[in-house]
Structures are given as structure tokens and as C-alpha cells.
Image (cartoon, rainbow, N blue to C red):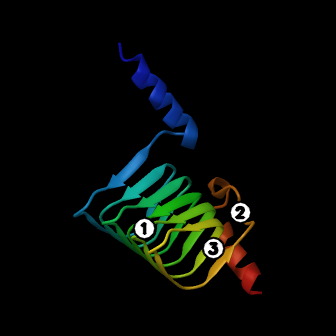
Amino acid sequence: MFDHLKKKETARTSENGNGSVNIISAGTVIEGEIRSAGDIRIDGSIHGAVASKAKIVIGSTGRIDGDIECQNADISGTLNGKAVVAEMLNLKSSAVVNGDILTGKLVVEVGAAFTGNCNMGPMVKDIKHADKQPAAITKEKTA
């Protein structure tokens, strides 16, 4: 009877390896660093760094005051900090980013605001195995 639900869950699990999605809902405020192997969706506020081996989504009510590091990211809310995104960063029309961006690919919708420097192109393709590598990449680019 519920076989179709099992198929969807299997598909989600195979996309990021563990199927977990972490949600920080609107009205929630977290102070400190967050690290996750799965996807993270932020609709509340984070005061600290956020790292994911998968995808980070900042919803339209979401705000991060700190750096982010992930494989892919979609930003509709506010980021005040550096973004290190191994593959693709999407800045939606309501996005506000104040900080530097280091990414493989960048998509910017009309209306998005970005203040900072951007380095785009080939970089760490698999952030799952590069816990310390983005800092090394930044040093190589500035050297």
C-alpha cells in the first residue's frame, strides 16, 4: 500500500548518501558551529559557521552570521560571511550576501544582492573528503 513512499525515500537516500535533512525553522536562533553530513535547511538564524558535506539551503527568512562550507547551496535569505561551495551556488532573487564567495559555478537571479569578492571555477569537487582543504585553496589563490 505504501510502496510508492518507500521508492521516494530510497531515491532521497541515494542522492546524498544518508537521506538526512536538518531543518532550522523560522524563529529558531542558534549560536555556535553546525556540522552535518546531510542537507541543512535554515529558515531561522545561525550565529556561527555552518558546514555540510551535502547541501545548505538558506530560506527567505533564514540568516547566517558566519561562514558556510558545502557541496551545493541555495540562498534566498541573508548570509554575512564567506561561502565556500564546491559545486554550485544559487543566489535567488531575495538573497543578500555580504562576504566572499569561492565556488565551482554561480547562478545569480535578478534582484539578488552580493557584496564581496568572487572566485569561480575548478576547485575541490568533493567536499566530503576535504574537511580542511578549502582553507588551503584560499591560501593557494592568494599566494
* Residue occupying image coordinates x 46% and y 74%: 112
At label 2, the amino acid type is: Val
N-term mark: 2 or 1: 1
Instruction: Mark 2: give few (<14), some (14-19) or many (20+) Cα within 10 Å.
Output: some
In the picture, the quarter occupied by the C terminus is bottom right
| Residue 132 in sight | no
At label 1, the amino acid type is: Glu
Q: Position of residue 54 (x, y in %)?
A: 54, 52
Front residue of 121 and 56: 121
Q: Position of residue 25 (x, y in %)?
A: 28, 57
State yes or no: discs 1 and 3 in contact (Cβ < 8 Å): no
Per the image, the residue denoted by label 2 is 124
Q: State the CA–CA distance, disc 2 to disc 1.
A: 22 Å
Image disc number at residue 102: 3
Q: Residue furthest left?
A: 27
* Residue occupying image coordinates x 50% and y 29%: 10
Q: Is residue 133 left or right of residue 30?
A: right
Q: Is residue 40 left or right of residue 106?
A: left
Q: State the CA–CA distance, disc 3 to disc 2.
A: 10 Å
Q: How many circles with numbers are drawn on the protein? A: 3
* Residue occupying image coordinates x 48% and y 61%: 74
Image disc number at residue 85: none
At label 3, the amino acid type is: Leu
Q: Position of residue 115 (x, y in %)?
A: 50, 85
* Residue occupying image coordinates x 56% and y 81%: 100
Per the image, the residue denoted by label 1 is 33
Element carrying mark 3: strand
Q: State the CA–CA distance, disc 1 to disc 3.
A: 20 Å
N-term mark: 1 or 3: 1
| Residue 142 in sight | yes
